[in-house]
Image (tube, rainbow, N blue to C red):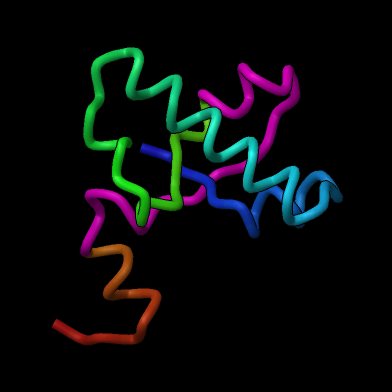
Amino acid sequence: MLTINKREIMEQTGFTESVAGRIVREAKQIMVNDGYSFYANKRLNRVPVEVVNKMLAIELQGSEGYIGNVQAERKSMGVQN
């Protein structure tokens, strides 16, 4: 699953930190309303990029390697198996 966070939204759109944070909060609320109670966690700061793209009606690029993809995260940190 491709996800996106506030920093990536800021980099790709030029939005301010507060606007990007609001986008993430609204995307989390959409996910909770769709039945994904996991997104009700205040500390979770990544949301599916598809939800953000639908909200903004633009194509942003997400990244793999955070939610549910431990292997990609380990590679990005330079950890060898």
Q: Is residue 13 left or right of 66 when viewed as pictured?
A: right
Q: Is residue 7 left or right of 69 when viewed as pictured?
A: right
| Residue 44 locus on image (x, y percent) | 36, 51
| Residue 45 locus on image (x, y percent) | 44, 52
Residue lying farthest to the top in this orientation:
34
Q: Quadrant of residue 76?
A: bottom left
Residue 11 higher or lower than 50, as above or below = below
The foreground one among 76 and 25 is 25
| Residue 78 locus on image (x, y percent) | 34, 86
Magenta segment's dominant SS is loop
Residue under the image location 22 percent in, 62 percent down: 70
Q: Quadrant of the C terminus?
A: bottom left
Residue 71 higher or lower than 27, as above or below = below
Q: Quadrant of residue 58?
A: top right
Residue range highlighted in magenta: 51-70
The foreground one among 54 and 35 is 35
Residue 36 higher or lower than 62, as above or below = above
Residue under the image location 64 percent in, 59 percent down: 7
Magenta stretch holds residue 80 = no
Q: Quadrant of the N terminus?
A: top left
